[in-house]
Amino acid sequence: MGGVRFRAPCHVEEGDLPASARPAALAAYVMALLHGMAIQAKAGFEREMLDAVVEQALSTWPGAGS
């Protein structure tokens, strides 16, 4: 998680994320999503469902609607 969290503040400074973004929380969110998807994939979830999870997660990303 350190690598994700390390880079996220730069994205706030560069304007890729809104100033209200919480880099540590976003890093934890991404890691939780990835771990959950790994479990689902191992349990046999279809790729289409995993892709839908990714699309849903991206739609909730800070600044996604701007």
Image (cartoon, helix red, strand yellow):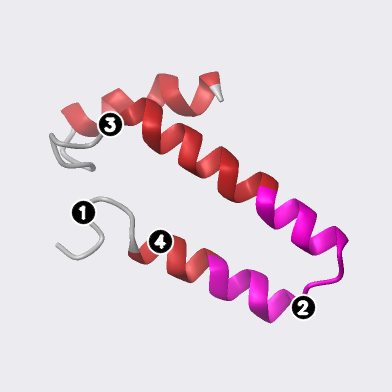
x and y percentages locating residue 35 in the rendered image: 68, 45
Q: Mark 2: which secondary structure?
A: loop
Q: For mark 3, give the secondary structure.
A: loop
Q: CA distance from mark 2 to mark 3?
A: 32 Å
- Does 52 appear in magenta? yes
Quickly name the residue at label 4: 58
Q: Which residues are magenta?
A: 36-53
* Residue 65 is inside the magenta segment: no
- Spatial CA span between label 1 and label 4: 10 Å
- Distance of label 1 from label 3 (alpha carbons): 12 Å
Give the spatial CA distance, label 2 vs label 4. Answer: 19 Å
| Left or right of 40, for residue 10 | left
Q: Quadrant of residue 17?
A: top left
Write down the residue under mark 3.
22
Label whose residue precedes the other's in the sequence (2 or 4):
2
Q: Nearer the viewer, residue 32 or 55?
A: 32
Residue carrying label 2: 46
Residue at 25% in and 50% down? 62
Q: Position of residue 25 (x, y in %)?
A: 38, 32
Estimate how packed mark 1 is, as few (under 14), some (14 to 19) or many (20 or more) residues with alpha carbons within 10 Å. Answer: some
Residue 40 appears in which quarter of the rendering?
Answer: bottom right
Task: Indicate the amino acid at tag 1.
Answer: Gly
First in residue order: circle 2 vs circle 3: 3
Find disc 1 in the rendering and name its residue: 63
Q: Residue at x 39, y 26 (%)?
A: 24
Q: Residue at x 78, y 54 (%)?
A: 39
Q: Amino acid at mark 3?
A: Arg
Among numbered discs 1 and 3, the one appearing first in the sequence: 3
Q: Pointer 4: residues within 10 angstroms few (<14), some, or many (20+)?
A: few
SS at circle 1:
loop
